Amino acid sequence: MDFKLELVVVPVSDVDRAKSFYTEKAGFKLDVDHRAGSDFRVVQMTPPGSACSISVGKGITDAAPGSTKGLHLVVADIVAARAHLVERGVEVSEVRHLESGVWVSGPDPKHGDYESFADFSDPDGNSWVLQEVRRSQR
C-alpha cells in the first residue's frame, strides 16, 4: 500500500505576501487560490518538479506563523539551485557540507547524496533546506 505525501500546510501571517514569495521568488506553481467567505482561504502551490505541494491560507491551521522548520527541497545541483533562487531574490545561505563532523563551506567535493545543504526562509520564518541528491543521475 502506498502512502503518498501530497500536501504540507505552512502557517503564515499574510496570505498574499506568502503567495507572492512562493510564486514570484521561489518559483512555485500556483495550483489553487480559493476563498469561501471572509474566514477561509486556501492557496496551494507546488515546487517545480515536486509531487508534494504546500498550502498557505486563512482558517486552515492554528499553528503559529513561521513555526514550520526544515522542509527539504531535494535538488540535483545545489550550486545551480541556490544561484537560481538568489537570482529570483531569495536570501539563501551559502552551500555547506560536513567534513569530520565540522561544517565546511561549499558543496561536498564528491557530490555525495544527502551531503550538501543550503537554507532559506519565507517572510514569516518558515524554514527550508536545499539538499543535493543525485541518485537518479547515476
Image (spheres, rainbow, N blue to C red):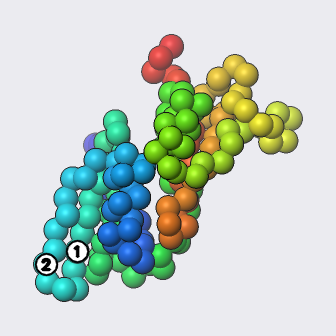
Residue plotted at (35% across, 39% down): 48
Asked if 132 appears above or below 46 in the picture, the reply is above
Kindly state the secondary structure of the residue where label 1 is placed. strand
User: Which residue is at the front of the view, 100 or 111?
Assistant: 111
In the rendered image, residue 39, in percent from the top left (x then y), is placed at 22, 86
What amino acid does circle 1 point to? Arg
Would residue 85 be visible to someone looking at this image? Answer: yes
Q: CA distance from mark 2 to mark 1?
A: 6 Å
| Callout 1 crowding tier (Cα within 10 Å): few <14, some 14–19, many ≥20 | some
Residue at image mark 1: 41
Asked if 25 appears above or below 19 in the picture, the reply is above
User: Which residue is at the front of the view, 77 or 131?
Assistant: 77
What amino acid does circle 2 point to? Ala
Residue lying farthest left?
Answer: 36
Residue at image mark 2: 36
Residue plotted at (46% across, 45% down): 88
In the rendered image, residue 115, in percent from the top left (x then y), is placed at 67, 33
Residue plotted at (55% across, 67% down): 125
Would residue 133 be visible to someone looking at this image? Answer: no
In screen coordinates, is 82 left or right of 96? left
Tell me the quarter of the picture where residue 8 sits: bottom left
Kindly state the secondary structure of the residue where label 2 is placed. loop
Circles 2 and 1, Cβ within 8 Å, touching? The answer is yes
Looking at the rendered structure, the number of numbered marks drawn on it comes to 2
Sequence-wise, the earlier of marks 2 and 1 is 2
| Screen quadrant of the N terminus | top left
In screen coordinates, is 38 left or right of 69? left
